[in-house]
Structures are given as C-alpha cells and as structure tokens.
Image (spheres, grey):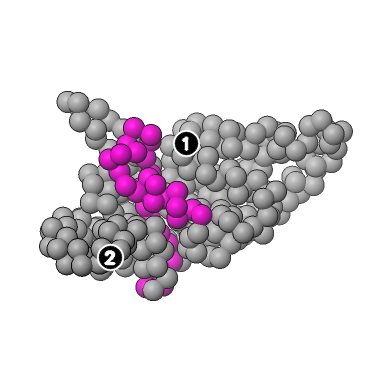
C-alpha cells in the first residue's frame, strides 16, 4: 500500500536515525524511497548551485544507510522551504507516504524537521508518518534516538466517526491486511461538548458509538486482525489520546488529520496537533485528500 515513500531529511543526526529505522515499512509494501533535502533558500535561487556540493556528500551517506535496508533510493536536493518542497516532491513522484521526524521542545533549534512537520500537517495531501525522537544526554551533547521498533505490533486507532476518520480507517484496514497487527479502536466522548447540557444523553451516545466501534471491529477481523479491542472513553480527547499513546501498550497511533478547510467541530482537527507534539510513539496521520 505504501510502495513509494518520501523521506524528508535535514541531514542531522536525528534525521539519520529516522533513516536507519525504515525497515518496518517493508511490511506495508515499501520498496522505493525518495530522499529529499530542502536547502530553504527561497528566493536566492543562484545559491542552490553553491550549496548543493556542500550537502550532497552527507545526503549520499544517508542514502547508503537506507539502501542497506533493502530499499531503492533516489535523492533530491531542492531549493525552497522544506514543507513546500516535501509536499511538491511527494506529488510529483506520486509517493504514497511521507516519513518525517518530530522532536521535543529541547530540539527546536537543532532539528529543522519539527517545524516542517507542523507545516505539513496543515496542507499535506498524503498520509504522514511522524517518528518521534528520545532526547538522550551524553557528555553534554544531545543525542536523538527514534522510537521505531516493531511499530506495527499494536495499533491505537482514534476515531470520531467523521468522514476523515473513515478515510483513516481505510488505511488501517489495508495495514491490517498486510501486517495482521493487534488493534485498539478508541473513541472519546468529548466532555467539553457534552457537559452540562447533554449529560443526560451520554448513555444513548455510548450505545450508538459502541455499535459503530463494533462495526469497525467486524471489518478489521474480516481483514485478518490478530485481535481487536474497543475503548469508549469520556474526557478531553487530546489529553486522553496522549495518555493512551504514552502508556507503553501501543506501538503506533493512527488518526485522521483535517488541516484547514474542514469542519472545525470534528475533534480530530484540533487534537492532531496536540498529539503529534506529545505522543512518544510513531503517529500516522491521514488527510481527507489521501
């Protein structure tokens, strides 16, 4: 399902660590990688030809790292802003997935990709796999280690049953067919919308939404899921999803990402930003356009 993937790199150690941990994507059909580095020089087009020879050796090092994992790799050095160039390259090369690293606040200056990931979430037309870093201190130097082991072991899927959530579920179903993981389906009843005026209808909401979760469960079992769990929660969606993601029980969180232009009332649109900044596991975000 993700035969041709785009990997964005800023040539940092953290970014290299992401590139060392792509092998798990082979279970999802990944065979070819477009490795993209953007110079971010915007209007200074002439500088591209001066900077390319400086960054190309490092890019080729990272290319070899990915090739040793069995991928076919093409590299591109592009001149303008990373978020723009990544989105454009994914469209031009018909990539089915964008892979990018995220970071904690302490790496905001060192790792360009953190701000790029945020920009991509607003406008990406392709699913985005965000791989987080652990910040390790060693001899007063920051070291980054991506959390990307067997990230298809147990998938947490967040849904509000909106159209974009259904789009994300379609990708989950394809992943289940390919990798047969364990899955937990999670819906959070948003207390901010229910209290105080709709509290008396919570039992009815729970009944309807549990039936919806059961429908999704049947589809995943039919697709070959090893095991499917259902979680119907009550509280603040962003807070609860981060707590579940960071509980140690899950290896990947999948959810829809609305970005701009979709209905603001569906909770996924405002929760995705919070989750991507605070989750300690990989997050796969699926836009409506995917």
Neighbours of disc 1 within 10 Å: few (<14), some (14-19), many (20+): many
Among the 4 quarters of the image, the one containing residue 102: top left
Among the 4 quarters of the image, the one containing residue 96: bottom left
Mark 1, secondary structure of its residue: helix
| Residue 231 location (% of width, % of height) | 65, 39
**CA gap, disc 2 to disc 1?**
30 Å
- Determine which residue is flagged by label 2: 78
The answer, for residue 197, to whether it is visible in the render is yes
Q: Is residue 49 above or below residue 268?
A: below
Q: Tell me: 133 left or right of 264.
A: left
The answer, for residue 7, to whether it is visible in the render is no
- Identify the residue at horizontal 73%, vertical 51% (top origin): 212
- Determine which residue is flagged by label 1: 278
Q: Is residue 271 above or below residue 22?
A: above
Q: Is residue 95 magenta?
A: yes
**Outermost residue, right side:** 200
Residue placed most toward the observer, 110 or 66: 110
Earlier in the chain: of badge 2 and badge 1, it is: 2
Mark 2, secondary structure of its residue: strand
Residue stretch in magenta: 93-122
| Residue 80 location (% of width, % of height) | 32, 62
């Amino acid at each position: 399902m993700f035969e041709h993937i785009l990997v964005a790199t800023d040539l940092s150690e953290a970014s290299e660590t992401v590139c060392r941990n792509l092998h798990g994507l082979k279970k999802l059909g990944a065979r070819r990688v477009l490795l993209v580095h953007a110079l971010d020089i915007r209007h200074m087009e002439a500088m591209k030809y001066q900077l390319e020879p400086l960054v190309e050796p490092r890019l080729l090092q990272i290319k070899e790292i990915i090739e040793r994992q069995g991928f076919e790799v093409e590299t591109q050095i592009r001149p303008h802003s990373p978020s723009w160039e990544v989105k454009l390259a994914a469209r031009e090369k018909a990539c089915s997935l964008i892979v990018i690293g995220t970071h904690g606040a302490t790496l905001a200056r060192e790792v360009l990709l953190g701000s790029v990931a945020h920009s991509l979430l607003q406008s990406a037309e392709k699913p985005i796999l965000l791989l987080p870093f652990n910040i390790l201190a060693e001899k007063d130097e920051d070291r980054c280690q991506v959390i990307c082991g067997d990230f298809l072991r147990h998938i947490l899927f967040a849904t509000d049953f909106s159209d974009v959530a259904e789009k994300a579920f379609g990708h989950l179903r394809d992943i289940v067919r390919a990798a047969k993981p364990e899955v937990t389906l999670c819906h959070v009843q948003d207390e901010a919308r229910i209290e105080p005026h709709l509290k008396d209808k919570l039992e009815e909401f729970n009944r309807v939404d549990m039936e919806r979760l059961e429908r999704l469960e049947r589809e995943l079992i039919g697709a070959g899921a090893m095991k499917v769990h259902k979680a119907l929660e009550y509280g603040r969606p962003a807070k609860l999803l981060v707590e579940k993601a960071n509980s140690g029980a899950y290896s990947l969180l999948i959810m829809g990402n609305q970005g701009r232009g979709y209905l603001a009332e569906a909770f996924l649109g405002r929760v995705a930003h919070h989750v991507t900044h605070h989750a300690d596991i990989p997050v796969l975000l699926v836009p409506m356009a995917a």
